[in-house]
Image: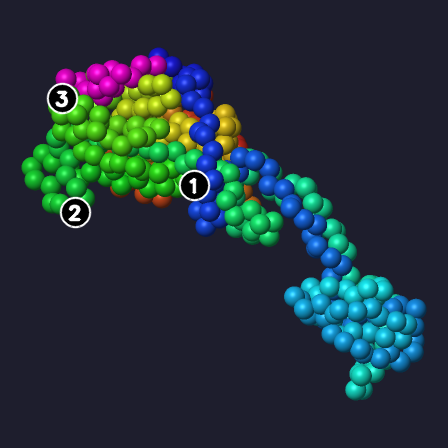
Amino acid sequence: MFSTSQAWQTILAHSRQLESVRVPLAAALDRILRTDARAEADSPPFDASAMDGYATRRALLTQPIRVIGESQAGHPFDGAISPGEAIRIFTGAPIPADADCVIKQEDVTREGDVIRVLQTDRPDFIRRRGENRRTGDIIVPAGTPLSPPDLAALASAGITQPEVTRVPRCAHLVTGNELVAPDRTPAAAQIRDSNSTLIAALLQSNGAELVAHAHARDDLTTAQAITAALPAHDVLLISGGASVGDHDFARPLLQALGYTLHFQAINLRPGKPLVFASRGTQLAFALPGNPVSHWVVFQLFIAPLLQHLQTGAAAEPPRLTGRIATGSKFPSADARQTFWPCRARIAGGTYELTPLPLASSGDSSGLAGANALLPVPPPPHTLDASQPVEFISCP
């Protein structure tokens, strides 16, 4: 039975970063930039005023200065300035020929077309051509998840179709005779399907596209036909049927579809019966049917896989340090590697973790509020509320 680290390395060995595409800026938020974005021109493209005021020559600031024109952003002054002359200028407007300083409007008095400078020892208030960046400078490096400021920087450089990683396409098959939609009232022996809602939200929060969702009863032939008809996808997620019961058909389904199984169980609580398979570049997981197990294995394996497909990064989920909340009920230790859902919050300048009192791995309502996973050491080790603990943040 694989350890969690062995399982992750096996997943990595059969996955690769997705190809790149070009998308409009409006569709590029949070996408991974694949090539360096470079400046096509100097910024600013000319010497520009940093203030509203008057552009003039510093040599004669102590004398009355005649205003001979105006320079606005987009409408520059077309001429030169002689000694004893100035132009009215506004922030962002080009500095005219021969001017070497801008006097802030607060530092002058004006009568008609004549100004007198009150403060002569101020800075020049000129933004020099190229002081922000030069032509060819990298403005957003490859590998950057594009934020709103990044998109603005691309727009300023005229990059309207950035090259980004394609979004992972995921298909979801939920299995079980007992499942009904959330808006239906279950009859005897039926339960509402919560895993489909969970998976759809988790995929969205991890930058993936849910291209298809289907429900299959516990029948291999029907499930095979439904799955074979799904649209093109990079990752197939099967909810339920991952164990070895008489009606658990996820493994034979994947094999019938031409997938190769790489592991069928891991040393994990909750989430032991996790199946991973591949078919060429397509990847597939059969997730244990219980909602808590769903959430745990998604955070440990599928979320970092979706990041790997987009970024090429191969790291396991990063760990933070916090402490157990006073009065918390500790989850029991187990020989399997345990990752327990918790609620993490900032308290007293550090993270405070409260393990959730889950009745079982099928307790979907008990999972509410979970945003962290706490590794629980196997016996004879124990958790100690007085000591720092590592945990995995699950945004």
Q: Answer whether residue 320 is visible to the viewer in this image.
A: yes
Q: Where residue 53 appears, x then y in whole percent? A: 76, 72
What range of the chain is rendered magenta?
245-263
| Quadrant of residue 198 within the rendered picture | top left
The vertical placement of 279 against 98, above or below, is above
Compared across the picture, whether 366 is left or right of 157 comes to left
Of the two numbered discs 2 and 3 in the rendering, the one whose residue sits closer to the viewer: 3
Compared across the picture, whether 236 is left or right of 45 comes to left
Which of the two residues, 34 or 235, is positioned nearer the viewer here? 34
Tell me the tag on residue 139. none
Of labels 3 and 1, earlier in sequence is 3
Q: In which quarter of the image is the N terminus?
A: top left
Badge 1 is on which residue? 395
Circle 3 packing at 10 Å, graded few (<14), some (14-19), many (20+), is: few
Circle 2 packing at 10 Å, graded few (<14), some (14-19), many (20+), is: few
Tell me the tag on residue 221. 3
Tell me the tag on residue 183. 2
Spot the residue most to the bottom: 112
Of labels 1 and 2, earlier in sequence is 2
Compared across the picture, whether 143 is left or right of 101 comes to left
Q: Give how far apart the Cα atoms at labels 3 and 1 are.
A: 38 Å
The residue under the point 77% across, 64% down is 95
Q: Give how far apart the Cα atoms at labels 2 and 3 are.
A: 28 Å
Which of the two residues, 158 or 64, is positioned nearer the viewer here? 158
Q: Quadrant of the C terminus?
A: top left
The residue under the point 22% across, 25% down is 228
The residue under the point 84% across, 70% down is 81
Does the magenta run of residues contain 292? no
